[in-house]
Amino acid sequence: MSDNSPISYSDKKYKVLGTRPVRHDGADKVTGRAQYGADVQLPGMTHGKVLRSPHPHARIKGIDTSIAEKIDGVYAIATGEDWPDLIDKVAELGEGAVNLHDLAQNCLAVGKALYKGHAIAAVAARNVHIAEEAIAAIRVDYEVLPAVTCVLDAMKEDAPILHPGLRTETLDEPSDQPTNIDRHIHFETGDIDAGFAAADVIVEKEYKTATVHQAYIEPQVSTALWNEDGHLKIWTSTQGAFTARQQTAELLQLPVSKVTVTPCEIGGGFGGKIPVYLEPVAAILSRKCGRPVKMTMQRDEVFEGTGPTPATFMKVKLGATRDGKLTAGQAYLAYESGAFPGGMIGPGTMCVFSCVELPNAVVDGYDVCVNKPKTQPYRAPGATQAAFAFESTFNELADQLKIDPIEIRQMNGVKEGSQRVDGPVYPRIGYLECLDAAQKSAHWNTPLEGPNRGRGVAAGYWFNIGMKSSVSASINPDGTIHLLEGSTDIGGTRTSIAMQLAETIGIPAEDVLPKVVDTDSVGYTDVTGGSRTTFATGMAAHKVGLDLLQQLTARVAFLWECEPNEVQVDGDVYRYRSQQMTFKELAAKLPETGDPVIGRASVSPEGSTNGFGVHIVDVEVDPDTAKVTILRYTAIQDAGKAIHPSYVEGQMQGGAVQGIGWALNEEYFYGADHKMRNASLLDYRIPTCLDVPMIDTIIVEVPNPAHPFGVRGVGETPIVPPPAAIAEAIYQATGVRMTELPMSPPRLWKAMSQR
């Protein structure tokens, strides 16, 4: 944490917000008593395993389970034939949408295997060893088909076709030819030709990024019990219990009221634990065998059978005048969607020019199916790739113009009233304030000395979303409040939400007791994703606080025999003429004033809360091995209002470290047979504590006008700037501009050797 963090642009002072109380779930987490998915134990528990395709693309001609069925201890076997007739329906999941027909086929294949690791069949048995024995005994007759695992190859006319019925969705007339291109997105503003004609300098570059996994430490794990009364109960590691309920109910064609999902503690998600994989399969097995079924993935199954972020091919062209004013920008983005349509191309196209004002611009985006796992959100889905391409080109433009990289961003940066290329106009935002904080930071103003060293800077943007949240609260006679919420706690949101209720009531954060409950126990709540939870569920907490305040004022008026509007409330103190009492004193008297005091609130804020960040990085490059060492790193971000600064700093640091992994090491490495070669955490190289220095943070607080406390989401933006910032630092250290991620030692050494 930097000494000058946070930088506030508000005069409003708070009693609870901005402090750093101990997290409410801390004791359970550090003592191992918190219940994760793997901790679930039920009477009569059985264990499930999944048979996965060894081929990246193959027609399933037949599945013979007769031998496996005869193994002692095998209770049930499921295949794609166990799905009910599924309709072609799209469901919103919070961070993206999903076609339910495709979702079912991703959980258990029907007709074709579309990637190595695709689930083909599943077994429930007395123990996991018997389940594995049964899996090995299942015989699948495959007709192996040609595969394609590169986005550019998949776009060719003679490419192997994954879905013969797929046609490109575009503004033009759809083609009648089979294709792997699901969507073509097109945005434009102004006159692109006139914009480039007005430019004194034009820079045009091509970029590639790799497939990268969220690499959460806890694998997917789910337990299902399909009871005799027809009610399905699920315990699972998920970012959204209600979304898991909706997906499972739709796939099994059950009313949602027949499904209860209990969200367990979650060992990381980052967007990867929004779709279901095991939940509906465990449910089918449970229905067949009449017992609870627990299913847990191994690490190779997580890499090969769940959704990473897309690999991409991108082109960006920028034009500017000699004094650094942008005149035009053009972007071409091709993103892999994986085995099924519906990837991250939408936010990629909306984010690529989100940090600058462009009078003339064109953006074309393509969503492309390949024989890889279906891509899923990963922290600011689609934005990091686009920012790598745009910010790298922008840095090269600044270098050619010999303009300071922060100054050229200040010159062209978006502010209140600026319009994105895709249409929305920004309300009050904090991008220029972040640039100002970066420019004044100790990091930027400390000379970088020594050979083979360079400094880079880049910016990033993520929308942050609202969506639906519900909470309820009840006041206890001891002066505490139980707060029930439906938002899975991934980054300390129990505390950040409790703090907003505490601030509203005027009591300490420790006196609000938050609890994440199942889908039967609270109103509908969308996923913990999109940087929405502290924003939207926090709004619900504030709203329930106002509800409680109104009820409490009425009870005080009853006790003092006055009108509610005559009661004055100052923090946790209630006054009427010479009488006063604290919240705790009032809580003790509530039983004698009438019914218990409970409150409830639901919110569904629309629109973006607009998060911006700027990162500065110093690197040293070994000239012999091309190993890049991060020497110093500073992340600056507008949080609107940092409810719990430690959690904001943690999000900024975590996102930056993951971005460093994207930049320097992480990638799915495929062989010529289109099979992943590094499906383990030993071979898939994520950063460790030995690879990164302490990430300094500077929190900027430009209040969000759409939130009662000014909150903006903070979890996603910090992964966006790192690759471009590090690429610039490598250029400053070596003179080599890297245009492909990861910038691993072999790839960088080759580029340095060809200089």
Image (spheres, helix red, strand yellow):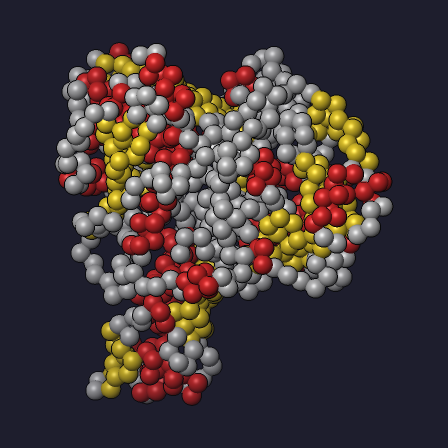
In the shown orientation, is residue 618 left or right of residue 247?
left
Q: Is residue 283 visible?
A: no
| Number of marks in picture | 0
Would you identify the image quadrant in which residue 320 lies? Answer: top left
- Residue 159, compared with residue 371, is above or below; it is above
Q: Position of residue 169 (x, y in %)?
A: 55, 25
Residue 44 x/y as whole percent = 73, 61
Q: Give the side of residue 383 with respect to residue 175, left or right.
A: left
Residue positioned 48% across, 40% down in the render: 214
Q: Is 199 above or below relative to 522? A: above
Asked if one can make out residue 483 in the rendered structure from this viewpoint, the answer is: yes
Q: Quadrant of the C terminus?
A: top left
Q: Report the residue at 30% width, 41% height from top.
A: 693
Residue in the image at 22% along x and 50% along y: 6
Instruction: Choose top left, top right, bottom left or bottom right for residue 407.
Output: top left
Front-most of 730 and 78?
730
State whether residue 713 is above or below residue 476: above
Is residue 468 or residue 219 the one in the foreground? Answer: 219
Question: Where does the image place residue 586, in percent across and percent down from the top left?
Answer: 35, 82
Residue at 45%, 60% in the rendered image: 29
Residue 619 pos. (x, y %): 27, 31
Q: Is residue 447 above or below residue 14?
A: above
Please state which of residues 467 and 726 is positioned toward the viewer in this rendering.
726
